[in-house]
Image (tube, rainbow, N blue to C red):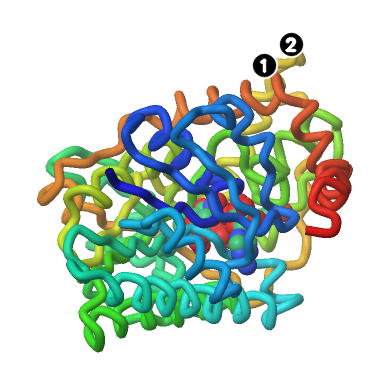
Amino acid sequence: MPSIIITGGAGFIGSHVVRLFVNKYPDYRIINLDKLTYAGNLANLSDIEAAPNYRFVRMDICDFSGVLALMNEEHVTGIIHLAAESHVDRSIKDPLTFAQTNVMGTLTLLQAALAYWQSLPEGFEGKRFYHISTDEVYGALSMTHPQGIEPPFTTTASSGSHHLAYGEAFFTEDLKYQPHSPYSASKAASDHFVRAFHDTYGLPTIVTNCSNNYGPYQFPEKLIPLFINNIRHRRPLPVYGRGENVRDWLYVEDHARAIDVIFHRGRVADTYNIGGFNEWKNIDIVRVLIQTTDRLLGRPEGADMDLITYVTDRAGHDLRYAIDSRKLQRELGWEPSLQFEEGIERTVRWYLDNQAWLDNVTSGDYQRYYEQMYAGR
Ligand code: NAD
Ligand code: TYD
């Protein structure tokens, strides 16, 4: 019976992955290993917390003996590693924490997996160490366009279908790493360690690099949930620089589906890019968020445009991210299921319907609750 540790399962993407695996694979044992930092919230999983195939363990991924003991106890066959410090702005203020969790934490998990699986008679057979990374490790793309056409222009990069792009280059799996932020530098370092453990020890690893995710349960420090919450309360919307930066957005459940496909059918030692072929300038997203939120709240559509406030740009702000995920489509048949318009509508509706969740995580009540619950353990 597969027994899988999912790290960071109380966070945004991790909670969607845990939910998918717990519901879809009743015969698997799913162990959610999470430290419950400010970004971890067990309320994200209240619908599945009582499932018989699910266990939550509060643990730091940097705790080598704790992870090793848990692997032994649960006869772990797979690790899906999402735990990380994930917010670029925080990494600019506190890079050391990012190095500690993202680099040392990943290395600790690799060491524990190596030690435990090497101790088994069957060794690495049937085992998987799947590391979830980001497209930000590739650096930034330019906004150049072929034949002098003004961006955005239509391309056919996605398996024959058309989409809008802001430049002719895309992130492909063979691109060299050029991280710019402390966050992306720490993720790049962790990716290198994961590959090194395959090449050096034969650990059966897989790495994926995904574009920006959006959807329910994202911590409201990231662009989309922060702005929905601010629009609702008529607070200013701090757009960095001129709002010209481009991100490629993927609905979080589509990422979770990709992780499922790749965990089961991906090639060991390989890398897959995951993206939505869905590029947006920040300022255009902000306008869509205002229109959608206003409409769903019964306000005149666009009434809150005056909340847009241009503020000092983020240091080292990457201009454009755009993923080429054709390899994943070609080899494993995955593609995004949701159009952006539908995904944004669902997302805005979810945050408006779940104001209590937002109030809870912004007030810090849930952190105090965990501190009490786990005091002395
Ligand atoms: P998140 O910040 O919402 O959640 C991170 C989770 O990790 C939290 O539950 C937190 O408690 C846990 N955690 C942090 N430090 C830990 C530690 N030392 N030990 C154990 N648990 C710890 O992050 P997210 O947005 O869900 O991202 C998950 C993963 O996906 C990250 O590895 C991130 O780099 C990657 N990723 C995110 C995006 C995105 O758009 N959010 C895109 C591509 C890749
Ligand atoms: P974010 O959600 O932090 O994701 P990432 O930095 O990993 O791409 O930011 C998305 C984009 O939105 C990014 O270009 C920075 C910009 N942004 C703002 O303009 N204002 C904000 O308050 C935030 C949080 C982000």
Which quadrant of the figure has residue 143? bottom left
Q: Quadrant of the N terminus?
A: top left
Q: Is residue 227 visible?
A: yes
Amino acid type assigned to the residue bearing label 2 in the image: Gly
Q: Nearer the viewer, residue 88 or 358?
A: 358
Direction from residue 309 to residue 126 in the image, left or right: left
Element carrying mark 2: loop
Seen from the viewer's position, the closer of residues 59 and 169 is 59
Q: Position of residue 266 (x, y in %)?
A: 19, 55
> How far from the left and from the top, in percent, is residue 281?
52, 50
**Residue at image location 28% in from the left, 41% down from the top:** 163
The residue at the point 85 percent across, 55 percent down is 375
Visible residue check, residue 87: no
Q: Which mark is residue 298?
A: 2
Q: Going 27% across and 65% down the picture, which residue do you hit?
A: 206
The location of residue 57, given as percent across then percent down, is 60, 51
* Ligand 1 positioned in quadrant: bottom right
- 270 or 181: nearer the viewer: 270
Check the image and name the residue furthest to the bottom: 200
Kind of residue indicated by mark 1 = Arg
Question: In the image, what residue occupies the spot 16% across and 56% down?
Answer: 327
Give SS at disc 1: helix
Which residue has dot 1 on it? 295
Q: Is mark 2 within 8 Å of ligand 2?
A: no
Tell me whether the residue at label 1 lies in contact with that at label 2, contact meaning CB atoms closer than 8 angstroms.
yes
